[in-house]
Amino acid sequence: MAEISRLPRPVLSAWEWQEKGACRELPTEMFFHPDGERGPRRANREKNAKAVCATCPVIEACRQHALSVQEPYGIWGGLSEEDRQLIIERQARESSRESRLSAQVIPLHMDSAS
């Protein structure tokens, strides 16, 4: 289940992109795997779901939503659960590295003779 605190507020403009999704009228089973699905069957289902996403006019909004709430299940914005996890982990590493770099103080030595 997604972390509820990360969900957008119940304001129509935050959710209306979903009305335009290419997946809107398709079966949810196409985007969410059943328990225990593995191997070629899962890979094929994900490939088909991602093909739908590739034609979607709101793919970027969908992707950003899934990443911001850290959606743990299904294909969202053309990304699988594993794809999103890799992106989130990479962003966390980059953020941590940037924090460490900005915390480092580089002393400036000004030579009054120059």
Image: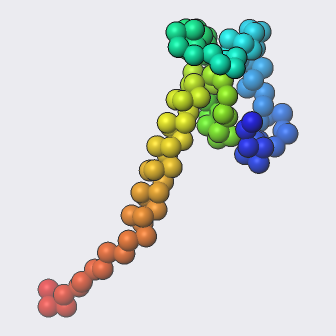
Residue 91 x/y as whole percent: 49, 45
Rendering colour mode: rainbow
Q: Is residue 51 visible?
A: no
Residue 106 x/y as whole percent: 32, 75
Horizontal placement of 3 versus 51: left or right?
right
Q: Is residue 107 visible?
A: yes
Residue 24 x/y as whole percent: 75, 14
**Residue in the picture at 78% in, 20% down:** 19
Residue 40 x/y as whole percent: 52, 9
The N terminus appears in which quarter of the rendering? Answer: top right
Residue projecting furthest to the bottom:
113
Q: Nearer the viewer, residue 31 or 35?
A: 35
Tag count in the figure? 0
The quarter of the displayed image where residue 7 is located? top right
Residue projecting furthest to the left:
113
The quarter of the displayed image where residue 8 is located? top right
Q: Nearer the viewer, residue 24 or 19?
A: 24
Q: Nearer the viewer, residue 96 or 62?
A: 96
The C terminus appears in which quarter of the rendering? Answer: bottom left
**Residue in the picture at 19% in, 87% down:** 111
